[in-house]
Image (tube, rainbow, N blue to C red):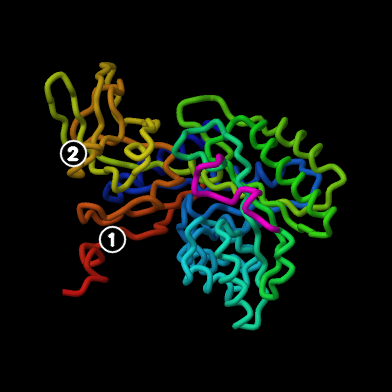
Amino acid sequence: MMNMIILRKKMISKIINEFTTPFYLYDENVIEKKIQFLNNLDLNFSHKFYFAVKANPNLAILNTIKRHGFGAEVVSAGELFKALRSGFDPSNIIFDGPGKTEFDLKYAITQQIRSINIENLDEIDFINDYSISKGLVTNIGIRINPNIDGYTMEKITTGKTGGKFGLSLDQINFESFSKFKGVNLTTLSEHIGSQIIDHHQLIKSYKELISLADNLKKNNILIETLDFGGGFGVLDHSDKKMNFSEWEKDLNDALKKKSYKIIFEPGRFIVADSCELISKILYIKKSGDKNIIITDCSLSEYLRPALYNIEPPIEVSSNSKKQITYDIAGGICESTDYLLKDVTIPEVKKGEYIKFLNVGAYGSSMSSTYNSRPRPLEIMMNKNEYRVIRSRDTLEDLCKNEIM
């Protein structure tokens, strides 16, 4: 074990010396261990995991996940295209999202994916009519809003009424689906939020879906699949985590003697802690009583601190014994461009490195070219080697789609 840690540190040091910061550095072994953990759960019912592509749509990462038997959950035509490009079979792709465009729906219909989960009643008519025009029948699901709080951050909760996600039961006439000739209702889905560690809330939401499907069956409306969403938490500054043993036991009990096919949609859980954003300290300055570090990464490379007010875990390359309290800022011309404030770390110097941890989910996928900053390099390492999985944007790339 110690030899592996030493070898990993040497490889990271070599990578840092070879490539210009900032860049995202993924550890493929971490991703594979998370996949293995989920695949080894003792679940006594038919089930499959579908990776939430929005967490990280890099083709190499998607292909790694696909090779381990996962499906893909997408929320746009672009994510669907990338899922197909990375090797997922259409029968292993589901399409969610509250704002699907006509192009999104047409593309998903013609690819004959496993299911399009609708969140607006108007989607049904369009999917039905377009499917009939193409001589197709499209499998659809309905995302139910169960009005259950995931006890997570307000900005990432999705299962309460008053929000934009899903449909409440009083809006849906299930008997009307029999009149549609271009759609086949196969699935009920729900997702109550992200970063959930209270498994009781997840089980509560699952039971709502199971009960609904059971009641529909009494009225000869047969549901094949229940999609329970994702939300398994990966917390940055806490040892707290979801009790999968209790979750597993409670879920097996809830599905005893049931014949539904079950889908889960983990995203952040799979990739979050597989990645470090490696940055270099450009400047250290005083401003009043503040010590401010200016790094070569910013909210363009990691938006979540500014968007959600989170405090990412970090590591610094300094070996100083002296502790200093800093604000860590990016170089974007925005007052919100801080990655951390009032963090006490070993004293650092210009040219040293700061690693932002747990950036594998919603790091690269939320990155932008704001301030016309080229998007960074992405590198994947494993036990023995490393390779570039996304080249750094060039300055020409910033202009390639523009017309003067």
Q: Which segment is the magenta one?
A: 160-173
Would residue 17 be found to the left or right of residue 210 on screen? left
Instruction: Tell me the quadrant of the picture where the C terminus can be found.
Output: bottom left
Q: Residues within 10 Å of mark 2 (few under 14, many from 20)?
A: some
Three-letter amino acid code at the position of disc 2:
Leu
In this rendering, the answer to whether 208 lies above or below 166 is above
Left or right for 191, reference 293: right
Look at mark 2 in the image and give the residue it sits on.
282
User: Badge 1: how crowded within 10 Å, few (<14), some, or many (20+)?
Assistant: some
Q: Position of residue 235 (x, y in %)?
A: 50, 32
Q: Position of residue 379 (x, y in %)?
A: 40, 52
| Residue 90 % position (x, y) | 62, 69
Q: Which residue is mark 1?
A: 393
Task: In this rendered view, identify the residue nearer to me: 109 or 284.
Answer: 109
User: Which label is found at residue 132?
Assistant: none
Identify which amino acid the numbered label 1 is placed on: Asp
Q: CA distance from mark 1 to mark 2?
A: 20 Å
- Observer-nearest residue: 274 or 226? 226
Q: Secondary structure at mark 1?
A: loop
In the image, residue 277 lies in the stretch drawn in magenta: no
- Quarter holding the N terminus? top right
Tell me what residue is drawn at x 72 percent, y 61 percent. Answer: 186
